Image (spheres, rainbow, N blue to C red):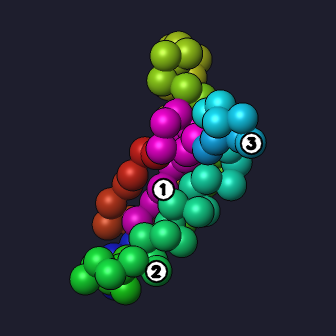
Amino acid sequence: MKKILVILVGGTICSSADESGVLSVSESSGSLLLSSFKNSASPFADEAEFTLTENLMLLSENLTVESWNKIIDVYRKYTKNEQFDGVIFA
């Protein structure tokens, strides 16, 4: 079993449409994304254990040096006492 850290940054992959069809960053999208993967027909669906971080709710077009530092802080927080086989920034 591979241990994968998923750092939820926000952006397109963590966006969802509201009732009007307008996309915005959603706190629940990361969980929905992983749930969809786990329930998919992928032959790898049962080969990974995911750890989700809090969603930073950042859109890539709004990233600043402060944003990158925040992402690095989250990475360090989650990898300080735990080993992961991979990291996904979503």
Check if residue 11 falls in the magenta segment: yes
Say which residue label 3 marks. 19
Q: How crowded is mark 1: few (under 14 residues within 10 Å), some or many (20 or more)?
A: many
Q: Which amino acid does label 2 sit on?
A: Asn
> In this view of the protein, which residue sits in the foreground, 69 or 4?
4
Residue 56, horizontal then vertical, whole percent:
64, 37
Q: Which of marks 2 and 1 is in front?
A: 2
Say which residue label 1 marks. 6
| Horizontal arrangement in the rendering, residue 54 relative to residue 75 (left or right) | right
| Horizontal arrangement in the rendering, residue 36 relative to residue 27 (left or right) | left
Give the mark nearer the N terminus: 1 vs 3. Answer: 1
> In this view of the protein, which residue sits in the foreground, 84 or 49?
49
Q: Which of marks 1 and 3 is in front?
A: 3
| Horizontal arrangement in the rendering, residue 23 relative to residue 37 (left or right) | right
| Residue 19 shows in the view | yes
Q: Looking at the image, do the residues carrying marks 1 and 3 touch, with CB atoms under 8 Å apart?
A: no
Q: Which amino acid does label 3 sit on?
A: Glu
Region of the chain picked out in magenta, as a range: 4-15
Give the mark nearer the N terminus: 2 vs 1. Answer: 1
Check if residue 14 falls in the magenta segment: yes
- Alpha carbons under labels 2 and 1: distance apart: 17 Å
